[in-house]
Image (cartoon, rainbow, N blue to C red):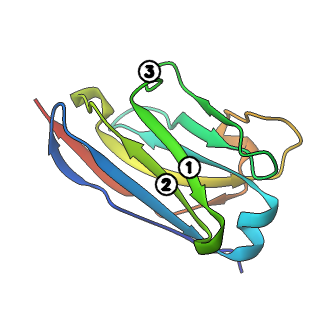
Amino acid sequence: QVQMVESGGGLVQAGGSLRLSCAASERTFSTHDMAWFRQAPGKDREFVAAIAWRTGKTFYADSVKGRFTISNDNAKNTVYLQMNGLKPEDTGVYYCAASQVPVFPARNVWQYEYWGQGTQVTVSS
């Protein structure tokens, strides 16, 4: 059974940094593109960043480009999201997800088949 577990969320002041981690089962990590989504209260879940498992290519939402970095560690079956220059509007529950659709980047929730449980990120002003 595929399992994905996020960690690293917390409370940070505006301008601060956090690093999120998502540990995935080996089978998922070696055959799926990985992504981070986030969901603010009362809003739809939105795409943040993705990394292709085959090439390592990355893609970012315009709202986080230049501030966030997605990366992976194959030896640890873990994908990371380094978040710098955090803003209050970055507040939300962050989810990692895995996709096997033959298109990169996949930016829609329905394109991802596996999800973690989410980790809360709160940025105070």
Q: Position of residue 32 (x, y in %)?
A: 77, 57
Q: Looking at the image, is 50 positioned above or below residue 97?
A: above
Please say if 36 is above or below 79: above
Q: Position of residue 109 (x, y in %)?
A: 65, 41
What amino acid is found at the position of numbered circle 1 in the picture? Ser
1 or 3: tag closer to the N-terminus: 3
Q: What amino acid is at disc 2?
A: Tyr
> Given contact means CB atoms under 8 Å apart, are the residues at marks 2 and 1 in contact?
yes
Q: Give the x, y percent position of residue 35.
A: 61, 46
Residue depicted at x 58% and y 73% = 76
Q: Quadrant of the C terminus?
A: top left
Q: Are marks 3 and 2 in contact (CB under 8 Å)?
A: no
- 54 or 60, which is in the foreground? 54
The span from disc 1 to disc 3 (Cα, nearest Å) is: 18 Å
Residue 118 makes an appearance in the image? no
Residue where numbered disc 1 is placed: 71
For the residue carrying disc 1, how many other residues have a C-alpha within 10 Å: few (<14), some (14-19), or many (20+)? many
Quarter-of-image position of residue 39? top left
- Amino acid type of the residue tagged 3 in the rendering: Ser
- Farthest residue in the right direction? 102
Q: Is residue 46 above or below residue 110?
A: above
Q: Nearer the viewer, mark 1 or mark 3?
A: 1
Among the two numbered marks 3 and 2 on one chain, the one whose residue lies closer to the N terminus: 3
Task: State how far apart marks 3 and 2 are (Cα).
Answer: 18 Å
| Disc 2 residue crowd, few under 14, some 14–19, many 20+, Cα 10 Å | many
Q: Secondary structure at mark 3?
A: loop
At numbered mark 2, what does the secondary structure look like: helix, strand or loop? strand
> Which residue is drawn at the image coordinates 79% and 45% (left, top)?
55
Q: Return the residue at label 2.
A: 80
Spatial separation of the CA atoms under disc 2 and disc 1: 5 Å
54 left or right, relative to 60: right
Q: Quadrant of the N terminus?
A: bottom right
